[in-house]
Every structure is written in C-alpha cells, then in structure tokens.
C-alpha cells in the first residue's frame, strides 16, 4: 500500500509514525514544502527569547529517526502543487509525481497578513516556522534592536511579547479587540492585562494597526508607537488551496470538511490538523481550532482507520489550552461566555478565588477558577488563572467534562491532598460546592461591578475595611453581623462581599435566615473586584 502524507507537522508526523507501527510493509512518504518537519512550533516564542537556547531541541523528531526507526521517506522542500484525484497522484513544484493508495492531508494553517499601508517602512516578521524564528533572532542581534511592536493578542502574540521583554526590548502589543487571549472572559483576562503591564509591556487594546511609518506604528486612534521592528501575530487561516483545487469540500471559512473518521468527500483522502473543521464539543458547531493535541490524535485515528485496527471516531474538540504570561498561567476548556451567547446556549456561572495549595503551608499562591454550566449541571466550560496549579485544575475539569460529568462531579472528585500540593478541599471541589450551593438556593452569586440601588455590605474586619473599600459600602464584620441586623434595611437588595467570597457566603446565609430575602454574595470577593478595576 502506497501512502502519501502532504505536510510534516503534528498531524502528518503523528499519522506516519502510528501507521508504521501498525503496518511495517506500507510505503509511506511525507512531502513537506519547507526544509523542516516535526518542529516544536509551540516552543518558537521561547526559542526567540532564548528560554530554549539549543536549536536542536526544537526538532521534536529528527529525520534520521523517521528513516532509520520508522522507515518513512521524508522529502523536504517538496511543495505539492496539484492533487490528481482521478489518477490518485500528487505533483510537486519540481515536477515529481507520487502515486498513492491513501492520501493524508496535513496542510496546517498559515499566518494571516492583511494589506498594511507602509509595511515596507519597517522590518516585519511572522512566526510560524523555525526559519521565521531564526530570522527574528538574527535581526535583533545584528541590529541591536531596542524596541518592537507585536500586532495581535492571541497565543503567539502574547508569548512573543513576553519573550521580547526577556531579551530586553521595549515591547508594545496592539490588539483590535478589548482584550488579549480571546478564550478567556473579561473577568478572568483582567489579571493577565495587569501582569503584562507590570512587566513593562505597553498594551493598546481596542485599537488596531492603521499604517506603518519609519520607526513608528500608527494606530486607528492616531496614537504612534515607537518600534524598530513589527511581529504580525494577527491570526491564522487554513492552508487549503490544494484541497479547494482538488474539489475537496470546504467550509465557508475555508477549512476542510471531514466525517468522524477524518475522511474527506473524495475517496481515499483523509485530512487532519489545523486545516480541518471540527465539531465543537459544547455547541456542536463546525469550528476551526488550531491546537497540537487534537492534530496529533487525529493523525493517530486516521492510521487506525486505514489499517483497520479497531477504528474509532473523532469525538469533537473541547478547545483545551494553556498559556504562560510571565508569572501567571491561564488555562481554559470548553466554551466561554461569548461563545455560549453566540450559540444561544443558556448558562449559569461561578467564580471563586482559592489557593494553589493549603493556605497554612508556605508560599500558597492565589488561584482563580471560573466554571460555566447549564440548568442540568452539565459543564460547558472552565477557565483558571494563577501562578501555580492552574494546569492540573483545568485538566481535571476538562477530563470530567469530556466524560460527561456534571458540577456534582466537581464537588465529589477525589483528588490528591497533601499541604504542599492542595487543600483537603481542592479548588476543583470548592467551585463544585459553590455551584451546588447556588443550585440548591442557599446563595445567589453576584458578578457585576454595578452596585446601583444596592446596599453594599463589607463583612471584612474593620481595620481591613479602613484601608480600602468600595465607595458607599457599609462595614459590619461577619462576627458582629447577628447582633447588628437592625442596621440593615430589609426592603433593599444587600450585596455582601468579603475578601475571597467564602465569608460573604456565610454572611448571606445569616441574612437569608433572619428575614432578609434580597441578598447577593459577590463572587470572588474583594480580590476579584480589585482585579477587575485595576
């Protein structure tokens, strides 16, 4: 059996290695249009910033490994320019022809670069391939660059901005939307914005790139940003022109359509990776989600299907991701509020501030978790931000979500506990308990900073209240509340807040059981309020 793989990225390489393990006799050829394959693409910003200093470490699997261990023939600089579906062959730019019995397309996605007025006035770069990183590093070193502008606040934009700061460059980040990292909701990403500003990045949010002048980037607002170079990280688009010319079905946005076994509408042609449309795990909508994990799993799935070894379907993409931003980490899974609203999905939410490990053990770090769920308790999405323990909490929630679990499963999850690693009630348990309390009618959480027509009740100690508090807030420390109920009106909504949200829950229960029926508890407490108002 002759198998041709177009593209040597995550999906293509994963397929080829798995296919060889299943069939040692198949003739497998990978055609890669660049001079690199199986590159650690997600590590490119850190290679630019010299966090990863050894270029060899960026090569996940060497060519010799593919050839000697897997007996896979990789052709570099072999750009495929045509797929002949009738004669089952592909042709390269150099005129070579490769026949196939099965064809796997791992075409990937390419950086989106719009037409920019004056782009010729300043050195500009994208970051997709190792060669791109080489060019950026060389330019910075050879020209002793001191300032740079990054356009785009997605993963690559945020990560490359951080790494330019590591190199000592004065760095500005420009994002047309009102926030960076769109998978996060505004009440979670606010901590990321603060961290970036504190580390010296000039953030220009809600402002787009208008034109480029020598040594200046001009924004839609008229602001001018000093820069000696520009890195364009505006986004990616599926690289599917080959598929389109071969009459392979595409979505309106240009992604390749496949069935649950990653088969296209053309017989014996499969597709995987960033160029493929997938079903959103929550909404069921057809979406493009460019992540290495799903690409690898899709490649493996295709190999199993071709080999007939217990083939199984691809069961949608959750969109689970994580990103480091200086001293903070942000992670997420499933849908955020904007996605749910766009899909017309009704949801409830909960947000808590907890600790990365037991508070009495030294160096516990703040950890914020947010969970979105529906009326039946089904988990629709989750986000977390903190400096420690973020990854494992979102991994746990993502796993429970993938297995069809509910918010009750968060409450009941039996997780590792020792003081250096967690509390007896892990933050995953705690947010499950908080949600269950709300679903049982024990408390009504509040998430907005609009306190109009409310009595704001601050139940923190008086000394803490005196240091700083919400304008107009009344202070009755929680321990005194039962004896001072007469000071509060029963005909108005009382919004209770404490430091993190737990004591305000206790205070709300006191009020609700003493004749106050319009009581709200501020989710995340003073810490969340401060994070959102910095």
Image (cartoon, grey):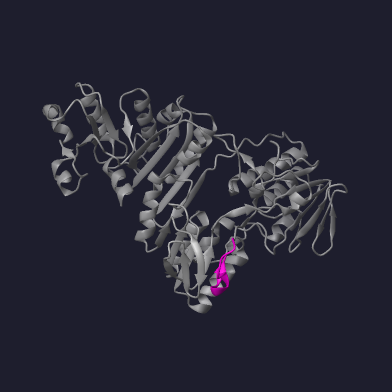
Asked whether, in this view, residue 355 is left or right of residue 25, the answer is left
Q: Which residue appears at 48% of the width and 59% of the height?
A: 208
Magenta segment includes 94: no
Q: Residue 403's spot in the image, x, y percent?
A: 54, 31
Residue 504, compared with residue 211, is above or below; it is above
Residue 232, compared with residue 461, is above or below; it is below
Asked whether, in this view, residue 456 is left or right of residue 142, the answer is left
Magenta segment includes 117: yes
Residue 130, compared with residue 320, is above or below; it is below
The residue lying toward the viewer, choosing from 436 and 417, is: 436
Q: Quadrant of residue 501?
A: top left
In this view of the protein, can residue 445 be seen by the observer?
yes
The residue lying toward the viewer, choosing from 134 and 467, is: 467
In this view of the protein, can residue 52 be seen by the observer?
no
Residue 486, compared with residue 250, is above or below; it is above
Q: Quadrant of residue 146?
A: bottom left
Q: Residue 226's spot in the image, x, y percent?
A: 43, 71
Q: Residue 530's spot in the image, x, y percent?
A: 29, 48
Q: Residue 195's spot in the image, x, y percent?
A: 37, 56
Q: Which residue appears at 38% of the width and 30% of the height?
A: 435
What stretch of residues is rendered in magenta? 114-125
Q: Which residue appears at 50% of the width and 62% of the height?
A: 209
Figure disc tally? 0
Q: Quadrant of residue 67?
A: bottom right
């Amino acid at each position: 059996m002759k198998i041709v793989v177009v593209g040597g990225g995550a999906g293509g390489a994963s397929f080829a290695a798995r296919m060889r393990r299943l069939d040692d006799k198949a003739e497998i050829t990978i055609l890669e249009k660049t001079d690199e394959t199986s590159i650690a693409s997600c590590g490119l910003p850190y290679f630019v910033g010299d966090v990863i200093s050894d270029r060899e470490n960026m090569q996940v699997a060497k060519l010799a490994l593919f050839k000697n261990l897997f007996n896979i023939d990789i052709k570099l600089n072999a750009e495929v320019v045509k797929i002949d579906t009738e004669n089952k062959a592909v042709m390269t730019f150099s005129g070579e022809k490769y026949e196939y019995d099965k064809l796997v397309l791992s075409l990937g996605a390419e950086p989106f670069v719009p037409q920019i007025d004056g782009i010729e006035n300043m050195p500009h770069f994208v970051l997709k391939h190792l060669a791109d990183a080489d060019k950026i590093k060389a330019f910075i070193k050879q020209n002793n660059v001191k300032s740079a502008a990054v356009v785009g606040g997605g993963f690559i934009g945020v990560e490359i901005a951080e790494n330019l700061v590591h190199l000592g460059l004065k760095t500005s980040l420009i994002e047309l939307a009102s926030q960076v990292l769109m998978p996060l909701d505004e009440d979670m990403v606010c901590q990321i914005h603060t961290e970036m500003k504190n580390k010296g990045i000039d953030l220009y949010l809600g402002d787009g790139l208008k034109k480029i002048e020598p040594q200046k980037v001009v924004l839609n607002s008229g602001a001018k940003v000093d820069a000696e170079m520009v890195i364009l990280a505006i986004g990616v688009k599926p690289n599917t022109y080959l598929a389109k010319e071969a009459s392979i079905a595409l979505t309106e946005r240009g992604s390749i359509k496949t069935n649950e076994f990653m088969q296209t509408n053309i017989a014996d042609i499969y597709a995987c990776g960033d160029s493929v449309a997938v079903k959103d795990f929550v909404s069921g909508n057809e979406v493009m989600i460019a992540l290495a994990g799903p690409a690898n799993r899709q490649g493996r799935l295709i190999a199993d299907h071709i080999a007939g070894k217990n083939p199984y379907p691809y069961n949608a993409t959750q969109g689970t991701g994580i990103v480091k931003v200086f001293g903070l980490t942000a992670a997420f899974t499933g849908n955020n509020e904007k996605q749910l609203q766009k899909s017309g999905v009704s949801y409830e939410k909960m947000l808590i501030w907890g600790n990365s490990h037991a508070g009495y053990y030294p160096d516990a770090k703040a950890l914020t978790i947010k969970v979105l769920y529906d009326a039946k308790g089904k988990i629709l999405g989750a986000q977390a931000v903190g400096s420690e323990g973020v990854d494992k909490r979102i991994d746990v929630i993502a796993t429970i979500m993938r297995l069809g679990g509910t918010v009750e499963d968060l409450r009941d999850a039996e997780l590792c506990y020792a003081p250096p690693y967690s509390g007896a009630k892990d933050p995953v348990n705690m947010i499950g308990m908080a949600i269950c309390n709300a679903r049982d009618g024990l408390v009504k959480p509040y998430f907005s900073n609009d306190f109009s027509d409310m009595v704001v009740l601050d139940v923190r100690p008086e000394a803490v209240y005196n240091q700083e508090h919400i304008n107009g807030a009344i202070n009755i420390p929680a321990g005194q509340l039962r004896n001072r109920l007469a000071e509060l009106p029963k005909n108005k909504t009382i919004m209770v807040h404490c430091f993190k949200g737990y004591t305000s829950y206790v205070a709300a229960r006191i009020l609700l059981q003493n004749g106050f029926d319009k009581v709200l508890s501020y989710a995340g407490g003073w810490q969340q309020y401060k994070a959102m108002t910095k």
